[in-house]
Image: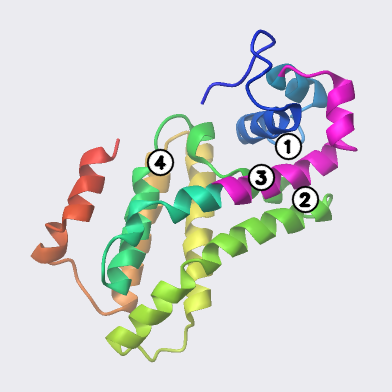
């Protein structure tokens, strides 16, 4: 996604440009290493404009987490993993979709709020809480399909839909950390392969020819990097 330059300031207002810059730069450099000067330069705004919209870098961090939650919610709401008619198929399609969008540089697919939460969980409680609302809020969008799948498959084990939904995010965030540590996106994809196996185990199912030939899964495999 291109960002506005000093030659095209009309492309979005200053606040939006700063939030977009924060989204990109923090994923690349981390919150602590991202300076107000970095953000102003990338957004083509003055420091005066920055402090007009955000009272501090910490306030920008909270707003960036909220911006991430809003924009990613829209993205995932329109994603194709909602298409399958069966609830468990939708849960597995979610995992397949998350794997398929691991593409490009590490900074392009890793999670802004996960990155910030790891840095500021103790020193920036307001940012941490905003990151938590984003992560847990996204996890909650999976709960209905997981619970439906439990009922449809007669699963009575002592785990909840909410706990499995949170576990999907634990695997994703851990996969992103491994990908960064190893400088290898395949490490994140590998984690999602194991997550799929784990979910299948919980629901007592195995990969069969019908699921292998499912049009949704075939399309994801074709589009994956």
How far across and down, in percent of the image, does residue 218 sit?
18, 50
| Residue underneath mark 2 | 127
Disc 1 residue crowd, few under 14, some 14–19, many 20+, Cα 10 Å: many
Kindly tell me whether residue 101 is visible in this rendering: yes
Distance Cα–Cα, label 4 vs label 2? 25 Å
How far across and down, in percent of the image, does residue 89 sit?
28, 67
Residue at the (46%, 55%) spot, across then down? 77
| Residue underneath mark 3 | 67
Q: Helix or strand or loop: what does disc 1 sit on?
A: loop
Vertical side of 130 occupied by 157: above or below:
below
| Residue underneath mark 1 | 31
Q: Nearer the viewer, mark 1 or mark 2?
A: 2
Foreground of the two, 45 or 211: 45
Q: Earlier in the sequence, mark 3 or mark 1?
A: 1
Q: Left or right: 33 with respect to 95?
A: right
The colour scheme used to paint the residues is: rainbow
Q: Earlier in the sequence, mark 4 or mark 1?
A: 1
Q: Helix or strand or loop: what does disc 4 sit on?
A: loop
Q: Nearer the viewer, mark 4 or mark 3?
A: 3
What span is in magenta? 44-71
Labelled pair 1, 2 in contact (Cβ < 8 Å): yes
Vertical side of 146 occupied by 15: above or below:
above
Labelled pair 4, 1 in contact (Cβ < 8 Å): no
């Amino acid at each position: 996604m291109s960002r506005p330059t000093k030659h095209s300031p009309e492309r979005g207002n200053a606040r939006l440009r700063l939030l977009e810059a924060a989204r990109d730069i923090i994923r690349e450099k981390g919150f602590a290493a991202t300076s107000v000067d970095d953000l102003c330069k990338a957004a083509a705004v003055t420091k005066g404009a920055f402090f007009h919209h955000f009272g501090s870098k910490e306030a920008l961090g909270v707003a960036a987490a909220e911006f991430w939650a809003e924009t990613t919610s829209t993205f995932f709401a329109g994603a194709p993993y909602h298409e399958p008619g069966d609830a468990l198929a939708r849960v597995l399609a979610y995992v397949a979709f998350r794997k398929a969008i691991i593409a490009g540089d590490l900074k392009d697919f890793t999670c802004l709020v996960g990155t910030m939460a790891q840095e500021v969980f103790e020193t920036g409680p307001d940012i941490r809480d905003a990151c938590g609302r984003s992560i847990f809020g996204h996890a909650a969008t999976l709960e209905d399909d997981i619970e439906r799948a439990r009922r449809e498959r007669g699963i009575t084990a002592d785990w909840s839909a909410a706990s499995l939904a949170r576990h999907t995010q634990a695997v994703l965030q851990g996969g992103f950390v491994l990908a960064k540590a190893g400088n290898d996106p395949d490490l994140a994809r590998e984690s999602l392969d194991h997550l799929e196996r784990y979910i299948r185990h919980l629901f007592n199912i195995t990969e069969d020819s019908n699921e292998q030939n499912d049009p949704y899964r075939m399309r994801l495999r074709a589009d994956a990097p």
